[in-house]
Every structure is written in C-alpha cells, then in structure tokens.
Amino acid sequence: MCLLCGRRCVRIYFLGSCPATYAWRCLNIANLSHQINEAILDREVRLISDTGEQLGIMSSGAAMEIAIQKDLDLVKIVPGSNPPVCKIMDYGKFRFEQSKKEKEAKKNQHIVEVKEIRMSPGIGENDFNVKLRNAQKFLREGDRVKASVRFRGRQMAHTDLGEALLRNFAEKCSEIAALDKPPKLEGRNMSMFLSPKQSASNK
C-alpha cells in the first residue's frame, strides 16, 4: 500500500542495467470486473492504445511498459480471445463513468407491476368511473392492469353481464392500453389483463 496515494502499488524493474534498478509506481488497482496491470499473467496480449489504435500482439510485459510510459493502466477487456485483448486506459476514470451510467440506467428503469382493479357486476356508474380513472393512471405510468369481476350467489347465473362490463372497461382504455388476455372465468372471478401501449407509457 502506497503511503502517498493510499492505493496498492507495485515495484517496476528496469533491466537495462546491471544490477537491475527499480522504481515504485502507483497503479489504479481494482478487482471489480476486469483484470488489470500486474494481475494480467498472460504471456501475450493483443494491445489497443488509449486512442483506439491497434498496436498488435506483444508480451504482457511490453504492453505493461507502454501503459506505464503513458501513466495509464493496462486493462484486459476481452479475456476469452486468443490472445486476450488488452487496452490502455485510465481505469479509475473508466469505472467512474461506468458507475455513472449504471446509476442513470437504474434511475430511468421502471419495474412493471400488475395493478388489480376489482369490480362487481352491479357496480354503479360513479364507482365504475373511479375504477376506470385509476386503471388509466396505472397504464400511463407503465404498469399492467388486471381488471376482475367477482360473482356472488345468484350472480353466477349472469356471468355475461360481467364479461360485458369488462369489455366496456377495456374499450374505454383502448387509446392507451392493449388487451393482453380477454375476459376469462375462473371459479367465481372473471378477469382480463391490459398492457400500456408504448406511446402512452412514454407520456
């Protein structure tokens, strides 16, 4: 651990003289998703410069020396190729930018939920309109809606009324929603699923 920068450092040997001389160099070492710097143990690598230039195949030691001369890091970006592909870059800056992009993506990500709207076959007009506005709100926010009708007692003899209610509900949502699953009776419940149209969810 370097006392100056607080990061892990390595001893770099210069073999041009006898005895060999060395110097300490601070490197951005991280073991998050890439092998970098002295962690790269491959005999040969295909090197890409920090400007995107193809520098060809060379020993990992030679590639590391080029990175040191530029005061940058050697990062293995395609470990599965033969030989592996390495790039010279500022790894600390790269990780910061990646983290920033990931946070932005999570910020813009919407987890689709299924919101349920429950009704009865004899629902009043005012209650129906309240349920309808709630469903339209959910759909505009990008969520799916499950609209269901519960039949009680003798209402089971008039399931056609429940189906008509649900189809009317779907029709009034048709500008912003698509009918995923038509009304289906399961036991005493009849339900259907609506999904937001892309233009509506974008709004």
Image (cartoon, rainbow, N blue to C red):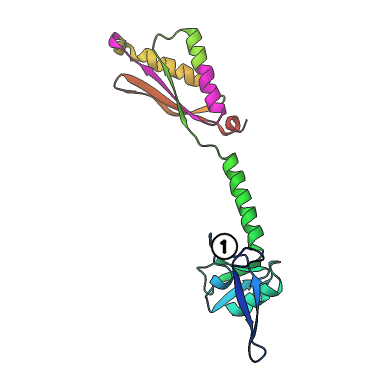
Q: How many marks?
A: 1
Q: Provide the residue span drawn in magenta.
A: 132-154
Q: Residue 121 location, x and y as percent?
A: 39, 12
> Could you say which is closer to the camera, residue 93 or residue 170?
93
Q: Is residue 154 above or below residue 147?
A: above
The quadrant in which the N terminus is found is bottom right
Quarter of the rendering containing residue 198: top right
Quarter of the rendering containing residue 188: top left
The residue lying at 48 percent from left, 10 percent from top is 127
Dot 1 falls on a residue whose secondary structure is loop
> Could you say which is closer to the camera, residue 158 or residue 83?
83
* Residue 196 in sight from this viewpoint: yes
Residue 99 drawn in magenta: no
- Going by the numbered disc 1, the residue's amino acid type is Ala
The residue lying at 39 percent from left, 23 percent from top is 191
Q: Residue 122 location, x and y as percent?
A: 40, 8
Judging by the rendered image, the residue that carries numbered circle 1 is: 30
* Residue 56 in sight from this viewpoint: no
Q: Name, please, the residue furthest toward the front.
A: 3
